[in-house]
Image (cartoon, rainbow, N blue to C red):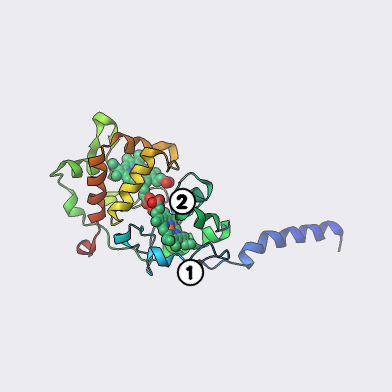
Amino acid sequence: MKPLSRVLIGGLLILAWPSAHAVDGQKIFTQGGQNPAAMACLGCHGPDGKGIAAAGFPRLAGLPAGYLAKQLRDFREGDRRQAVMEPLAKALDDAEIDAVSHYLATLAADGAPDLRRQQIAPDATTRLALYGDWSRQIPGCVQCHGPGGSGVGEHFPPLAGQPATYLAAQLNAWRDGSRRNDPNQLMVNVAKAMTDAEVKAIAEYFAQQGSQEAKP
Ligand code: HEC
Ligand code: HEC
């Protein structure tokens, strides 16, 4: 064999390496990553990945893989500062991040929010969620996060059914700059225009969407 073709074949083997050694996303979820600092996710995010509302641990089940992988890289790179997830994400390599994100995206999420309840906006919080407040340049949350806050595509995560404390913590993280990973500062501007009372109320509003009673 000529040296050049040997080099080419060697190159192809290196390219084929990741798929030949596919990382098991389910194993990372249930047992943790290669590095012991990457603890199993289920301990905090729940055995079904649906989160632990009482502790403020968010649901990961059924979230888009692209969004999850981005968040893990953002924690790793410091664009999203949070004491628990930062060291965990730093202990995961790229292949592990992709594998566990794809696994989580396949897990069942809770039922979609009952949209019939969304048609009327009886109070200020519902109006903010549905229509926003253009006098402060706040678009309605559902205009990006989808009907009932159920999420849209890879970039707009669901809000429905996430713990209220978690949602409020994220809005406050954008306000104080500890989370600065939103594309085009879409969330920073929204969060900074809101009052403390609105942050609390809107977090409770979306936490209640898509709860058990709204299941088909
Ligand atoms: C010791 C508890 C704990 C463990 C273990 C843990 N997490 Fe988390 N995770 C959290 C907390 C707390 C948050 C909320 C962080 C915040 O407020 O920004 C979170 C947030 C996240 C988010 C962001 C969700 C969103 O909607 O933006 C992702 C993604 C995530 N975790 C993935 C994982 C993965 C993958 C594992 C396993 C390798 C894991 N977590 C293990 C506690 C944990
Ligand atoms: C112009 C589009 C847009 C609007 C309007 C918008 N969001 Fe967002 N929101 C985003 C994007 C994009 C992200 C994901 C950022 C990232 O990649 O980390 C996000 C993320 C979030 C998160 C974090 C979710 C998680 O799982 O960590 C919360 C909470 C949130 N938005 C709340 C709201 C609320 C409440 C409103 C209405 C007051 C709102 N958003 C309006 C675009 C928008």
User: Does 136 sit left or right of 103 as displayed?
Assistant: left
Residue holding disc 2: 71
| Residue 18 image offset from top left, x and y in percent | 63, 62
| Residue 143 image offset from top left, x and y in percent | 30, 43
Sort mark 1 into few (<14), some (14-19) or many (20+) by Cα contacts within 10 Å: some
Residue holding disc 1: 26
User: Does 124 sit left or right of 63 as displayed?
Assistant: left
Q: Residue at x 44, y 55 (%)?
A: 84
In this rendering, the answer to whether 24 lies above or below 132 is below
Q: Which amino acid does the dot numbered 1 rest on?
A: Gln
In this rendering, the answer to whether 31 lies above or below 116 is below
Residue ranking furthest to the right: 2
What kind of element bears circle 1? helix
Q: Residue at x 38, y 41 (%)?
A: 174
Residue 64, visible in the rendered structure:
no
Q: Which amino acid does the dot numbered 2 rest on?
A: Gln
Ligand 1 neighbours mark 2 (CB distance < 8 Å): yes
Residue 17, visible in the rendered structure:
yes
Foreground pick, 194 / 144:
194
Q: Are marks 1 and 2 in contact (CB under 8 Å)?
A: no
